[in-house]
Image (tube, rainbow, N blue to C red):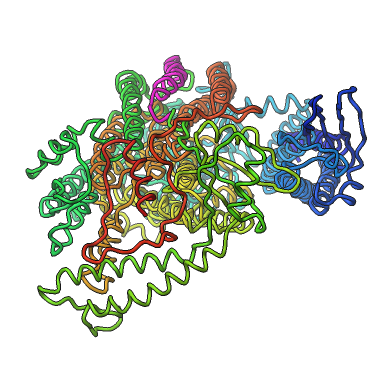
Amino acid sequence: MSLKTRSIVFVTFFTSCLMVGLLVAGLTTNHWIQGSAKRNNFSESIGQINFGLFSGHRQLNVGFGWRDYKIDVPSMIRDEPEVMSYWLWLGAALGTGLGVLGGVIGAIGAVLKSASASKKTGTMVVLFVSNLLAGISQTIAFVCWLLQFYNYLTHNVLLMEDRNNNWYSTGLTMLGHSFYFIAGGMALVVVNLILLVVATRLEHRERNKFTHPVTDDKTQGAIMLLSGRKEKQKMYTLLSGFYKYLTQKDEYCILILGLDNAGKTTYLEAAKTKLTKNYKGMNPSKITTTVGLNIGQIDISGVRLSFWDLGGQQELQSLWDKYYSESHAVIYVIDSNDRVRMNESKEVFDRMINNEYLSGIPLLVLANKQDLPECMGVREIKPVFQESGHLIGRRDCLVMPVSALTGEGVDEGIKWLVESIKRNSIVHNTRQHDTESMSDYPNSTVPVYSPDREACLVLNKTKILINLYEGIPETLLLNVIAWFFLILLFTLLRQQAWDYGRLALVNSHGENKRWTQLFYAHGNVPGGGSGASETSDTLNSLSMDRGFFSWIVATFRLTKEQILTHSGPDAVHYLSFQRHLMVVMGIMTAISIGIILPINFSGTLNGDKNSFGHTTLSNLSPDSPAMWAHVVFAIAYVPMVMLIMRRASGRNAFKTAPTRTIMATNISQGDCSKTIVRTYLQQLFPDVSIEDIQLAYNISSLIKAAEDYERTVEARIFCEAHRTRDPILAQPSFFSCAKVDALEYYKEVEARLAGEVARLRASALNEPLGIAFVTLNSAHEAQHVLLHFKPGTYREWNLSFAPAPLDIFWENLSIDSAQWYCKWATVNFALFLFLFFLTTPVIIVNQLDTLALTKNTTSQISKISPLISEFLPTLLLWSLSALMPVIVAYSDTWLSHWTRSRQNYLIMTKTFGYLLFMILILPSLGLTSAQALLQWTIESNETYRWDCIFLPDKGAFFVNYIITAAFIGTALELIRFPDLICYLWKLATAKSRAETPYIRKSILITFPFGIHYAWMVMVFTTSTVYSLACPLIMPFAMVYITLKHFVDKHNLFFSFAPSNMISQGSGGKIHSTAVTMTKFSVVLLLAIMAALAMVRTGKIELRGVVLLLALCLTLAMFACMSPIKRCTTKPLRIVETDGPAPIYVADVLINRRMVSDSPSHLSYGSDTTMNIAMNEAGMSVTA
């Protein structure tokens, strides 16, 4: 085991000892819980209680000084089980104890493993098992104590003796520092497992490494030299070993093969002489035939090349394959002056190149001895080896003339080899490249090698599309063409329509419209009797929308007041967020194109002016002073993003709670009475006036029946209104063609559903849920009650501000906490497996590359147009990333959240998290999914190239992705195909056309702010992260945010229902959190720039240190500015709404009589925010 592996294993000894110390401290200290108590008397008695797993003490001050009482926790649990759960306490204690045991075993195993010279893996298995035991045990302890805290200790920490003396818990109970020792131990377990994974991979690599055979004196000397070097390395300390690990250069092994007397050793000496400073090579006349191997090293371009010059005699050629598995490139030397042995050299070359271990690695073929007058030229040698072209396959290959004796062409070949090895090691571990075979090389002595991607694709001798700049031009062209066609399609559909989206619902005329007239429209003004009030500005805006493309002008001219009137304050905050993003991205675009792009283009490391890599950060030398420009702008983006985005109006959207209604939960069944609730609160707060009390009931079954009843009633009314015209027929069964009279059918169904609804309503009123809504006289009284209410020993109620009635999912209130948490764990675990491991968008995209590299399909894939190879993967990625938020949204709907605002908020945060990992982080790491990450940790024969982390060349993939999102994505959002498909499906499954009015109402939804916030911030984060490494991404990101703003402005006004989440307590938090999520972009930018600085240079230098310090300062600044809960939370600023308070009763429980002569009508617009609140109240009162 090498020093590096021993060092890593030995570090786990210290972390295991530290973990054991933390766990022992947690077991022995008594600060797991810290609480306080009070007693209402003239002296204001106070108390403090803290205890651990086994002991504790309480201090009570009854006016005569502090009295200290010891607590025996096991006895307390046995005598008073209502204070703590015995099983949860036992789980916490056993989990902590087993964590100590696992830590001790891990520390002992680390010492034995680092001191042992054995190569057996048993000790490493023990280390893994012990750390897993410690981690699982601590997790159990952590979860058990959290459940103990939230289920028991937050309500009461006092003994029965104290409660009988009128003491009560203040509700300020918190977890003490002893509990956080367990969290620290869990973090150390994670560190240990990571170190052990790294050590295991290094150990596997060393075990599989081939030991050089000892064949002669030259070999003996070379191996003794290496052995002596290893013995000296053992004398280094651990710190020097880590320092070497951080500062060492990448080392590549190169085989020099060929027949004996071909000039291999002379070539090696010439290379060392030319490329090694102060090295004086051997006299060529003294070089003898190699009968073992020669070893030489050359440091060039930041890497170290180790050359293995193997003997070419026939009896030594059988030893070549022992070195193949460790080689990164092959130099094959041909004696161009020996015509007799040319065929023999070709046979040896065929056997060598056919070995599976050499598949895909770079090959440098040297026609040596070109200084002799009778030598064969490259044009004569190549036909001899032309038959081996199929063996060379898809790899970097170069044939060039050299003279090892004079040194001509030696350094050019080595430099080409270095670039090929670097390129080969970055792309794939299998080292596959798109190159031509030897048979396709031109007859020239100039060094020729193929680029990574062909400059054009020839199909049937016809050039189809230019494939420069990683397919960006054709992707842009195809997207623009598709965008124009989609916009034209939308305009045609809209022109043929009569009503559009929300506005279609307020026009009660023309029921015989086509489906386009029901789904698309061009701003028809609502007719009389619609019930929707419109301002004069709104009417003027709609009247402009008359021409073919006039909807574009009308959308541009929409003002903030019109948006507020029609779409609500949420739309105003959302559009304000987009405008501020446009300012930030505009500044970044100017910097990227005007400053960063010329700097990147000035480099010479990556391609030419026709290559995308020439525009990226990889084109600059790692030591270039111009790299400081990237550092300065990366740091400057932090305050710019922070200061501009903090001005977005949505940042302060959550700081109001316009309600005077309190929501009381956890009410026992015996207390589920309005009288009991009123009496109890009046006893606690006699100076508070209670206006109304409403209880919540189990209406989960009633909701569905009421919806069917409403649809049937409206269909019956429609039939009655049209019975003088053509008779309407209904198809009762979807699988039968039989039709009946629609009016008679709906009357029959209505009578049946009316009885069922009445029965379910009566049943629901007998099932109160333990939830009450208490409306007080003013919001200040509600705040007073919340601040001073303390759960007693008899009634453990939980009080909070009530959300608005329209924000509540009344049917979900019947889901209790245990059932909800079970569903939450099931849904999120299934969602994690499905999205994170199976449907990562890059997996399917990666399959195209895998197919293209399959040997059997090489000829077929080479004929595929760039339309598939470049444009289709990014379109597929966009499609799958668009599907992902839909899956998350449906899964969260099944979770049965109590409020719509909470559901929207969680959809946004979860969607952004999944998108961040699957669209940005994992592809940038070069991994197709988290599954690939796990496979890499267990595969011992593969070496991960850390150069692949956030490689700037991968930016072309993201440029193509953002182009697709900007053009095709925004155009599809206008057409709204998912909503259209849903609408057509409902029309197709309707029993008759009499159900069309109800269907038109059912498709009206509010704008999914959570999904759109997550997707938009994801694009902003991606473009920011690559803005300096790949500056070409920023113009397309700016196009995306501009088109996105226009499309969303149009859809918010014309297509979706108004939204007013900020009037629903914490509903406006979604806007402020979106502003906070933009901070991830600059944090990731600093982290990636720091990683690139250290990975590219192979050492820690000043630029990396500056970026790391900036990253730490940024994280600290964001932590201080984030809305982190503190011990004392500031009370919400209460804004009271005028008019009567809304009634907290579900609509289905109100026994209202349906109007028989006209269909029911709802209002889908409002003049102001105040009108929305009044309409809500009015609806409840009217009902």
Q: Position of residue 28 (x, y in %)?
A: 89, 36
Is 919 in front, or is 1124? 1124
Is 556 in front, or is 1093? 556
Does the segment drawn in magenta span residue 86?
no
Q: Is residue 529 left or right of residue 390?
A: left
Q: Number of marks in the image?
A: 0
Q: Is residue 312 left or right of residue 793?
A: left
**Range of magenta residues:** 624-651
**Which SS type dominates the magenta stretch?**
helix
Does residue 1164 sit above or below 698 in this rendering? above
Q: Position of residue 1103 (x, y in %)?
A: 53, 18
Does the segment drawn in magenta span residue 635?
yes
Q: Quadrant of the N terminus?
A: top right
Q: Residue at x 16, y 52 (%)?
A: 499
Q: Is residue 913 left or right of residue 379?
A: right
Q: Residue furthest left?
A: 547
Q: Position of residue 576 (x, y in %)?
A: 33, 30
Q: Residue at x 45, y 37 (%)?
A: 423
- Specify whether residue 998 is in view: yes
Q: Quadrant of the C terminus?
A: bottom left
- Specify whether residue 315 is in view: no
Q: Residue furthest top?
A: 625
Q: Position of residue 59 (x, y in %)?
A: 87, 30
Q: Residue at x 59, y 50 (%)?
A: 934
Is 1021 in front, or is 763? 763
Is 284 in front, or is 18? 18
Q: Is residue 1054 left or right of residue 345?
A: left
